[in-house]
Amino acid sequence: MSGHSKFANIKHKKEKNDAAKGKVFTMLGREIQVAVKAGGPDPAVNGKLRDVIAKCKSNNMPNDTIERSIKKAAGNEEGVEYELVTYEGYGPSGVAVIVEALTDNRNRAAANVRNAFTKGGGNMGTNGCVSFMFDQKGLIVIDKEEVEMDEEELMMAALDAGAEDFAAEEDSYEITTSPDDFSAVREALETAGIPMASAEVTMIPQTYTELKSDEDIKKMNKLLDMLDDDDDVQNVYHNWDE
């Protein structure tokens, strides 16, 4: 991804190594469980589950692992109920941070996230304190090396399917949609055989904050690393211009 890529900046990715990848599969398993609970185990009639499955595939989760997770969620063998909780706050120098957690223990999740903000030189705020600075959008990222279609043809395919915007970055294409149109656009591209490096509904900052001091950068990285290490944390969005 290029340094100015929305995708590179807005989402602190967790796929740092093989161990982290295993953790990503665990996180995706939780997303499957929540989607199945909300709309049932059949992706043909559960659009949210279809989107999560697409996200699993873009993270190279094997099909049999996806199927096992769906069956496990349908049976809820462990009896564990996860709920989505969102926290908002500020990092060093006012960097806006949104944290999404899927947890079976709200108190534990809140305490851990608050601790990460504190030790990372920031502070957790109330809901709504920074989310107004972000737009919720569907974001589909396509690796230029993985797609055979030329740029103009790909752009027309995306726009015809209902995409809002198409941008060519240094080594990727980024397709932006409204949250409501995301599934239709993703499925149209999937049907056309277009490989997607990432496809999910995310939070895109309206503006970015630059950290100028080494100390602030160190603290911001500590905050993000602590959130990465938290098993309850699913997604972290921020407007740090890395």
Image (cartoon, helix red, strand yellow):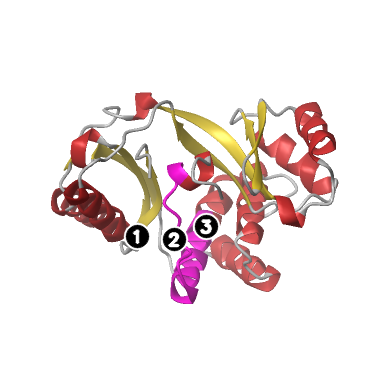
Magenta stretch encompasses residue 39: no
Choose between 47 and 96: the one closer to the eye. Answer: 96
Please indicate whether residue 78 sits to the left or right of residue 72 in the image.
left
Q: Amino acid at mark 3?
A: Gln
Residue placed furthest toward the bottom: 19
Give the residue at mark 3.
33
Choose between 71 and 8: the one closer to the eye. Answer: 8
| Residue under the point 54% across and 47% down | 2
Query: Distance from label 2 to label 1 (Cα)?
Result: 7 Å
Residues at marks 3 and 2 touching, judged by CB atoms closer than 8 Å: no
Q: Which residues are magenta?
A: 9-31
Q: Secondary structure at mark 3?
A: helix
Answer with mark 3 or mark 2, whichever residue precedes in sequence.
Answer: 2
Q: Amino acid at mark 1?
A: Asp
Query: Distance from label 3 to label 1 (Cα)?
Result: 21 Å
Q: How many marks?
A: 3
Q: Amino acid at mark 2?
A: Lys
| Residue 47 falls in image quadrant | top right
| Residue 183 falls in image quadrant | top right
Query: Distance from label 3 to label 2 (Cα)?
Result: 20 Å
Q: Residues within 10 Å of mark 2 (few under 14, many from 20)?
A: some
Magenta stretch encompasses residue 20: yes
Residues at marks 2 and 1 touching, judged by CB atoms closer than 8 Å: yes
| Residue under the point 81% across and 27% down | 160
Nearest-to-viewer mark from 3 and 2 = 2
Choose between 5 and 110: the one closer to the eye. Answer: 5
Give the residue at mark 2.
14
Q: Is 150 rendered above or below residue 55?
A: above
Q: Quadrant of the C terminus?
A: top left
- Please give the label number shown on residue 110: none
Answer with mark 2 or mark 1, whichever residue precedes in sequence.
Answer: 2
Give the residue at mark 1.
228
